[in-house]
Amino acid sequence: MLVLLLCPPQHLGPHDTITIVVISRLFYNKGTDLLIAALPRILAADPHVRFIIAGSGPKAIDLEQMLESRVLQDRVELLGPVRHEEVRDVMVRGHIYLHPSLTEAFGTVIVEAASCGLYVVCTRVGGIPEVLPPHMTTFAKPEEDDLVAATQKAIAALRANRIRTEGFHEQVKKMYSWTDVAERTERVYDGITGAISEEEFYGDVSGGWVVGYERKGRSSKVCAH
């Protein structure tokens, strides 16, 4: 179940604290090693950045040891495991959601983050690039240098007020409503069975991330590949 709750607009000055949220199982495939490597560099580059990290797993001890050795405990809050109903309360404390996963089929958590008004920095792996439109995300290769650079780019854009996140909730709500999901699913079956033509199914894929289509008086959007 997605957490779709509206958050107020946030305008940040050059010295305001930016909070980066991570909610993840602390496993290798979720990019915890990548997070451990990138986090000290992100904090060193900006004294007004802090992290909130929620989750548990075998890599938790590595994360804790890194924070202790780098003396970063005062800038990184470790929450441990959180229940799904608590996710929204964690999300709204942040400005950026960092998702360093090495493999991902969909990434529901980044939809939840955008819905809560967070700008998303995530690795370009699996199906993640198709989950949200470009104005909600900055992508990075699943490499330390690129993740650090992408996060710093997002921080700079937020400080310059080049990113407006207050409209994210309504946009996500429209993209991932159950009505829209049902219509997309129905349309896939229509394409498979030949109820609609191949041209009507694929539409015009020249326009970027999404393609509009109309059918039976309804309009929606699908991902362009």
Image: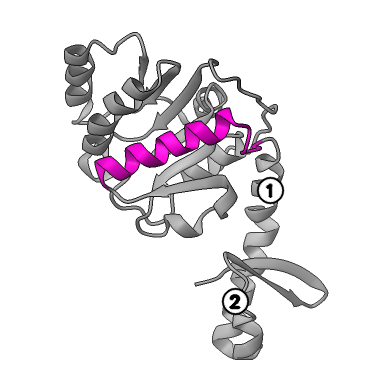
Asked if 36 appears above or below 14 in the picture, the reply is below
Residue pictured at 59% horizontal, 31% vertical: 160
- Give the percent coordinates (x, y) of residue 95: 54, 28
The image quarter in which residue 122 lies: top left
- Horizontal relation, residue 81 to residue 195: left or right: left
Q: Is residue 155 magenta?
A: yes
Q: Secondary structure at mark 1?
A: helix
Q: Nearer the viewer, mark 1 or mark 2?
A: 2
Amino acid type indicated by mark 1: Gln
Residue drawn at (21%, 36%) of the image: 33
In this picture, is 49 found above or below 74? below
Q: Is residue 171 above or below residue 216?
A: above
The percent coordinates of residue 98 (x first, y second) are 41, 36
111 relative to 126 in the view: left or right: right
Amino acid type, label 2: Ser
Is residue 172 visible to the viewer in this orientation of the structure?
yes
The answer to whether one can see residue 100 in this image is no
Upstream in the sequence, badge 1 or badge 2? 1
**Which labelled disc corresponds to residue 86?**
none
Nearer to the camera, 14 or 4: 14
- The residue sitting at 64% across, 64% down in the picture is 182
- Residue 206 disc label: 2
Q: Position of residue 186 (x, y in %)?
A: 63, 73
| Residue visible at 62% across and 53% down in the picture | 176
- Position of the N terminus, as image quadrant, is top right
Q: Between residue 124 and residue 57, name the one nearer to us.
A: 124
Front-most of 207 and 128? Answer: 207
Where are the magenta residues, as a range? 143-165
Q: Is residue 61 magenta?
A: no
- Image spot of residue 162 (x, y percent): 62, 38
The image's mark for residue 171 is 1
